[in-house]
Amino acid sequence: MSHSIEIPKYSMDQLNAVYAVGKEGAFRAGARALNTKPSTVKSRVEKAEELAGEPFFVRQRDGVQLTPAGEAMLRYAEKVLSISPGGDRPEEDILFKPGQVTIAAPGAIGTYWLTPHLSRLCDMLPVHLAPAIVNDTDLEKDRSAEADIAIRYSDPTFSAGLKKSYLGTVHMMLHASRNYLKKHGTPQTPREVLDHWFIEQDAIGAHAFLRNQIFGNRLNDDNQLDESYVRIKTHNASVVYEAVLHDQGIAAIPTYVREVDSRIVPIEAVPALDWPFYYYLRQEAAESPSVRTTIEWLTACFDPVRYPYFAPEYVHPDEIEKQRTAGTVVPLFSSR
């Protein structure tokens, strides 16, 4: 075998089987990842080896070891599976990667909202499947094609063959830590905000122009754009959150931060801005049982009745707090 794989020889079932066994290191573990019988996986691997004329694995007591031909086949299978919807039978799960349901999400939503909900999704999915969240910050790297479900503020770079559905609305307000406001005072007007340090998420989705939407284009004495009040710029939503939490300044943050840490509080100086977001998935994967289950979970995570932070209309965090006290809002965290 020359280790250059001829594409027409191998079925997707065979490629999935080789990939799963190679990644998991054993036939039984590979079968669990594919939700099928070990004998079925073994048969598919053996047929692929027969076509190649060389073995892909050395069978050992506690698993398998890849041969040089197996390493080449694994690289090939990974490449093909990364651009293929996967699976030959539409009634089965069609997943981007065997053994996991992949969700691409903006950093803040994935880290601070979806992660605390993941245990419920784990309980809903079959035991052989694990949820995986990848960071899609809507920058140059569009990861929508690398996921079973992609959550985005804007259309993906390549939207052909994707289904789109509204998921919720993020409401952005200025926030600061209680300690920062205690030390520097709470601004009451947009002009007073300019006397404070501003932390900017300079990223598509959060959008660098968010600052201009709030404050307008402030010019300095040389008639140039004045950014002297911007203390920190970052693409990363987690950096914005941590900087605010550690009393570094004011930032535009989604109102659901109230559920993440009550030490961060909203500022009334400017109105909230609305950012609707959507989920996308491949049309051929729409009927996959695990994808449908994950969409059901996602919809519950952003239920506007339970979590008014994501309702189309803006609801002030203080009003949500009152609703929670009245028992009409479900708290995300048991302690904050």
Image (spheres, grey):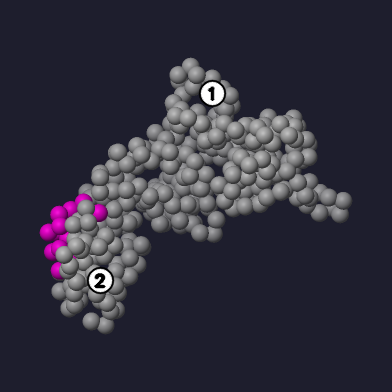
Q: Helix or strand or loop: what does disc 1 sit on?
A: helix
Q: Position of residue 78 (x, y in %)?
A: 33, 65
**Magenta stretch encompasses residue 59:** no
- Name the residue rendered at 21%, 61% in the picture: 26
Name the outermost residue toward the top: 326
Q: Position of residue 225 (x, y in %)?
A: 78, 52
- Name the residue rendered at 36%, 62% in the picture: 82
Q: Position of residue 280 (x, y in %)?
A: 42, 47
Q: Give amino acid for label 2.
A: Leu
Q: Nearer the viewer, residue 218 or 61?
A: 61
Q: Quadrant of residue 249?
A: top right
Q: Nearer the viewer, residue 213 or 106?
A: 106
- Name the residue rendered at 78%, 40% in the picture: 195
Name the outermost residue toward the bottom: 2
The relative height of residue 281 versus residue 297 in the rendered view (above or below) is below
Q: Which range of residues does the magenta coloring cover?
A: 33-46
Q: Give amino acid for label 1.
A: Glu
Q: Which residue is mark 1?
A: 321
- Residue 43 disc label: none
